[in-house]
Every structure is written in structure tokens, then in C-alpha cells.
Image (spheres, rainbow, N blue to C red):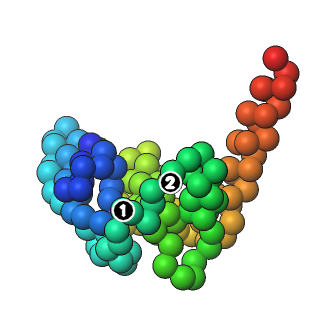
Amino acid sequence: MVVHSEDGLDEISISALTYVAELKNNHIEEYTISPVDFNIPIQPLASLQAKDSSESLVLVKKALEGKGVENPARDIVALNAGAAIYVCGIADTLKQGVEMAEDMIGSGLAKVKLSELASFTRYYKNAE
């Protein structure tokens, strides 16, 4: 799956249509998707801009917060993680992949995995 959004992202966007080229069963299918196809509202990309690494970390942590209020960071992560879940064959459809990603975020599992990754990388950094 190769994606490119109308707003210039090389990932699935929360603010515009995204063009998709998907290789499946030896056939390339081209189509467009919108966040609303996945029950995610269209939102401005400005809500995802970070001025420095501290703001970026806040956005990453916010992306892994459960459901509730509007959360553009969570939504873009769910869309793109859902695509990865679908491409890996874990989900039968892109929509199902996005739903699985939202469930993992909502349950706290994604946050736990990020914490495990951070611990792992700190361990090896300190082992040098």
C-alpha cells in the first residue's frame, strides 16, 4: 500500500483525501479514502504541529490516550496504524484495521508498548 494525501503527507491524512495504490492478489487497485470513511472527523493539520522535541513528545503521548474528546493525534495514529495492521494481514479490511488500532489505543495497550520500547532503548543506550 502506497499512500499520499491531497495535503502533501506521505501517510493517511486527517485533513484531506488520501490517494491509495494497493497491491493485492497481483493487482494494483487505486482509490481514495477520507477520515470520515472511518468515523474520524476531518481536522486541521495545524493541530499536529510541534515546535520542538518536547511538544512532539506531548503529541505522541496524547496520541495514545483513550477515546473521548476530539484528539487529532490519536486519530492520525489510528488511521496509519490501522493501515499497517491491514497490510500485515491481521485485519481483513482497512476499516477493520483502523478499528483494531483504535481498540489498542483505547485499552491502553499501545501506551504500554511505547513504554516498553522506551525502556528497551534506554537499557541498550546505558549498556554501551
Dot 1: few (<14), some (14–19), or many (≥20) neighbours within 10 Å?
A: some
**Which of 34 and 89 lies nearest the eye of the viewer?**
34
Q: Residue at x 57, y 51 (%)?
A: 56
Quarter holding residue 119: top right
Q: Earlier in the sequence, mark 1 or mark 2?
A: 1
Q: Residue 81, percent across and down?
A: 47, 54
Image marks 1 and 2: residues in contact by CB distance under 8 Å:
no
Specify the amino acid type for callout 1: Leu
In 3D space, how far apart are the residues under numbered discs 1 and 2 (Cα atoms)? 11 Å
- Indicate left or right for 104 with 22 as reference: right
Q: Which residue is mark 1?
A: 45
Q: Secondary structure at mark 2?
A: loop
**Which of 74 and 27 lies nearest the eye of the viewer?**
74
Q: Which residue is mark 2?
A: 50
Q: Residue 18, percent across and down?
A: 23, 57
- Indicate left or right for 118 with 31 as reference: right
Q: Residue at x 73, y 42 (%)?
A: 118
- Indicate left or right for 7 with 59 as reference: left
Quarter holding residue 105: bottom right
In the rendered image, which quarter contains the C terminus?
A: top right
Q: Residue at x 23, y 42 (%)?
A: 23
- In the rendered structure, find residue 65 and report the number of the disc placed on it: none
| Tally of numbered discs | 2
